[in-house]
Image (cartoon, rainbow, N blue to C red):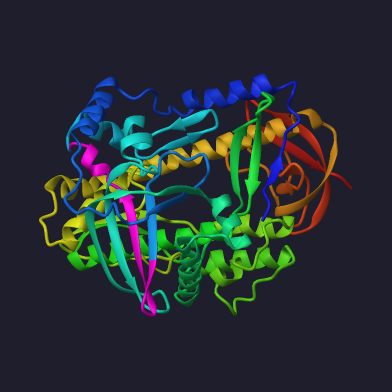
Amino acid sequence: MSHHRIAPNVDDSSDQLAAALAALRTELELPGEYPADAVEEAQQAVDALELPEQDLRDIAFVTIDPATSTDLDQALFIDRTGNGYTVLYAIADVPSFVAPGGALDAETRQRGQTFYAPDGRIPLHPEVISENAGSLLANQDCSAFVWRFDLDAKAEVQTVTVARAAVRSRAKLSYKGAQQQLDDGTAPPVLQLLKEVGLKRVELERQRGGASLNMPEQEIVQATDGGGYRIVAAPSLPVEDWNAQISLMTGMAAAQMMLDGKVGILRTMPAPDDRSLLHFKRQTSALGKPWDGQVSYGEYLRTLDASDPKQLAILHSAGMLFRGAGYTPFDGEVPAEVIQAAIGAPYAHTTAPLRRLIDRFVLVICEALSNDHDIPQWAREALPSLPEIMASSDQLAGRLERAALDTVEAALVANHIGQEFDAVVISGSKPSNGSSSKNGNGSSNGNGPFGVIQIADPAVTARCDGEMESGTTVRVRLLKADIASREIRFELLP
């Protein structure tokens, strides 16, 4: 699959765009510089780190991430064992760097996760941990939580354990490079086996009714020629899905381990209700690719081609099916609701401790349960507080992502006021109450009916004034594109 890059014509407004993006840090009250006492504590922890007694540095682990990533949470090794497979999955040992109750612990609980702003990453941990000693960089001795899976011929888990060990990754692979090696037949055995196991895990996902909302990844990047920002959008590569299946397998194993031990915290999500499913079914009919309900909605979503504007609109509409996710802690009694409906099984965030707070606690609990150790009291005591921390952090990350994309989308079309575009109607007309319908994209003084439309080039979704029907193709004119307020408005043409 090729990357689709959208280069905005914002030469005259690049300074305004940069200023608007920078202002998001203040507007959203994003975390600032890391406190000096927490950085000092992190450096002391790095200096004092001792590798675990179990030594797995002879295992040829590799990491597979976006090419520019330096905060590497996971390293992978797969081998064939008889008719099945052995998977070793090393996860960064962040708990070894964070003293419970210290300044670093307090700051990570304030942040909750790494935030990705257009003008730079705001890390959960100081860089001495997240991009150096704690990151599973190639040719660096690291401490890690190593999950061992014994899989059968269908890639179903037969046994699973997790323990701390010393590891040493052999190579930092990129998704694009790994996919190229697989496509041209030069991939090393670990990638060939990742494809083999990944495809089988995808089939198991289908069988349990799991669903993935594979939206094209949108990333805001600075132009290399100094001409402001642009949105880079690309459908995910197959190797990304196969790699994600290993992470999903680990999260499912962690959830089951904690359920068996009757202590931990799950990522839960209810199944979509009948009303949401009916509305989605109507949307798919209106957009020309009807879902008849004879196959699961997860299976239907896999058939969609995000490069088709109408099918991309369906993917946007499918977001209504993935609502209500939360965190469910428990200690001593298993909760009544344990399923993450999109995955089709109990699940726990486990594999990204450098970038997400909750994984640190899950790893420590699972390691103790797997080895019949006492669970550290600090981990048990934190469980009731984690849902609120993560919900607040997730909400802030979502606001940042939407606001940043809205700002850049406004810049993409800022020089095209008055021009006409072909568009697909994502949602049809509704009475106006004077506010914008576009997921928080600014505000509007427009009166009368309006809908939400999507233009293809540049790829922008926005409010459009006028009466329109979902799924139709319409001609629209751009009325307004204000970078500072993130407001975009079109009008429907006869």
Q: Which residues are magenta?
A: 79-99
**Residue drawn at (47%, 71%) of the image:** 205
Residue at the right extreme, as displayed: 494
In the picture provided, is 468 more to the left or to the right than 87? right
**Where does residue 158 sit, x and y in percent of width and height?**
30, 75
**Residue drawn at (38%, 76%) of the image:** 84
In the picture provided, is 70 more to the left or to the right than 128? right
**Where does residue 101 sit, x and y in percent of width and height?**
17, 35
Between residue 18 and residue 471, name the one nearer to us.
18
Q: Is residue 83 magenta?
A: yes
* 483 over 170 or under it: above or below: above
Between residue 312 and residue 269, name the one nearer to us.
312
**Where does residue 436 sit, x and y in percent of width and height?**
64, 39
Residue 444 appears in the rendering: no
Q: How many marks?
A: 0
**Where does residue 367 sit, x and y in percent of width and height?**
20, 56
Report which quarter residue 394 is drawn in.
top left
Residue at the left extreme, as displayed: 374
In the picture provided, is 336 more to the left or to the right than 399? left
Report which quarter residue 476 is drawn in.
top right
* 330 over 126 or under it: above or below: below
Residue 93 appears in the rendering: yes
Between residue 213 and residue 487, name the one nearer to us.
213
**Residue drawn at (18%, 36%) of the image:** 99
Q: Is residue 329 magenta?
A: no
| Quadrant (top left/top right/bottom left/bottom right) for the N terminus | bottom right
* 396 over 162 or under it: above or below: above
